[in-house]
Image (cartoon, grey):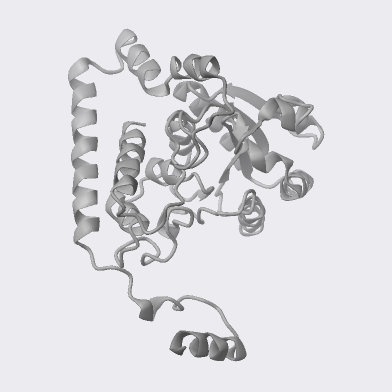
């Protein structure tokens, strides 16, 4: 959670310095417990699908900070050679099947991965994270239905940060709890405190174990909050300042630190060490990304499928 928080804060700094390849950047400050709790419940062979607000997911899965920052800066050493940017980072070696700039666009990919696991019996579970805005997309309903019918090993996790851009969750759905929503597909639904990393972890473990046994998918609604606007250009004037104050009082990092100290999981020295190591790792990642060469124009159409006719059009456009 500390690495995610510090990476996202540094990303905003780098963005304001004009060093990112794009001004379109969505940070997950305030939502760290969901990414950490879900990814801790995963096994090495498992798959993960992610969103446009997905930096934290890859970090929690063990992603390389230098390659991530390089990708955000449009550098050749980035995860996608600098061509994907903030919303399209992928690491197949970690089972990370890609972030997706289309709201809900990756939910169908998660079901496809779950179908492959079912057919191949590779004992992999797919963790599919998405925001509350995706719950009202058609692909969500289609994917949930198919996963339930075929009892696929998929765990659907909604990071309900309360707003789809500026639309409040309470005004976008008549069923605000996920237990009720999951019942429509005859599968278990769990509502969990998304600011409590231990609660998220326990719910994700139970759902992953169920999927691995062949008992099918689970829908988890992790209720959390993004502390900033939808993107850097959103001042979030549509939100009640008192609401923001209440949620900031439940920042997942201080909550976990207090519990860890009270229950003897960590001491003060360990917390300082974790924070220091995270800062050093992010400093090194930024320095490496800044020193890396920019993505070359010549690689723009590498790794892209295109029939010969379409390739000719691409070549003509490039030469023009």
Residue farthest along the top direction in this orientation: 262
Residue 213 at least partly seen: no
Residue 236 at least partly seen: yes
Q: Residue at x 55, y 91 (%)?
A: 312
Left or right for 245, reference 146: left
Residue 150 point in image, percent of width and height: 76, 49
**Figure check: 62 above or below 235:** below
Q: Nearer the viewer, residue 180 or 11?
A: 11
Left or right for 298, reference 219: left
Left or right for 38, reference 184: left
Q: Residue at x 73, y 32 (%)?
A: 172
- The quadrant holding residue 282 is top left
Q: Nearer the viewer, residue 318 or 298?
A: 318
Q: Nearer the viewer, residue 194 or 25?
A: 25
Quadrant occupied by the N terminus? top left
Residue 47 point in image, percent of width and height: 52, 50
Q: Residue at x 64, y 36 (%)?
A: 132
**Figure check: 196 above or below 55:** above
Residue 258 point in image, percent of width and height: 34, 12
- The quadrant holding residue 274 is top left
Q: Nearer the viewer, residue 91 or 253?
A: 253
**Figure check: 137 above or below 170:** below
How many marks do you count on the picture? Answer: 0
Residue 67 point in image, percent of width and height: 31, 56
């Amino acid at each position: 959670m500390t690495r995610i928080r510090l990476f996202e804060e540094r990303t905003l700094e780098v963005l304001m310095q004009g060093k990112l390849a794009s001004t379109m950047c969505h940070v997950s400050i305030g939502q760290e417990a969901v990414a950490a709790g879900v990814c801790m419940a995963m096994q090495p062979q498992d798959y993960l699908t992610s969103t446009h607000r997905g930096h934290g997911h890859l970090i929690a899965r063990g992603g390389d900070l230098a390659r991530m920052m390089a990708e955000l800066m449009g550098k050749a050493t980035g995860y996608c050679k600098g061509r994907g940017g903030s919303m399209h980072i992928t690491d197949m070696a970690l089972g990370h099947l890609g972030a997706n700039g289309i709201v809900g666009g990756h939910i169908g990919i998660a079901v496809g991965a779950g179908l492959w696991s079912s057919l191949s019996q590779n004992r992999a579970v797919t963790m599919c994270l998405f925001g509350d805005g995706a719950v009202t997309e058609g692909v969500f309903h289609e994917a949930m239905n198919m996963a339930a019918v075929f009892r696929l090993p998929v765990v659907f996790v909604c990071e309900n940060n309360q707003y789809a851009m500026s639309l409040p969750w309470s005004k976008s759905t008549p069923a605000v709890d996920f237990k009720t929503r999951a019942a429509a597909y005859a599968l278990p639904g769990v509502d969990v405190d998304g600011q409590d990393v231990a609660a998220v972890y326990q719910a994700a473990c139970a759902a992953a174990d169920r999927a691995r046994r062949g008992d099918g998918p689970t829908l988890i609604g992790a209720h959390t909050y993004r502390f900033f606007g939808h993107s850097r250009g959103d001042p979030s004037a549509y939100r009640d300042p008192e609401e923001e104050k209440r949620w900031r009082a439940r920042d997942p990092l201080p909550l976990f630190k207090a519990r860890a100290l009270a229950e003897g999981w960590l001491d003060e020295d360990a917390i300082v060490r974790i924070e220091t190591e995270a800062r050093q790792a992010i400093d090194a990642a930024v320095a490496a990304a800044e020193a890396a060469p920019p993505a070359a124009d010549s690689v723009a159409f590498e790794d892209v499928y295109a029939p010969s006719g379409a390739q000719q059009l691409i070549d003509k456009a490039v030469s023009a």
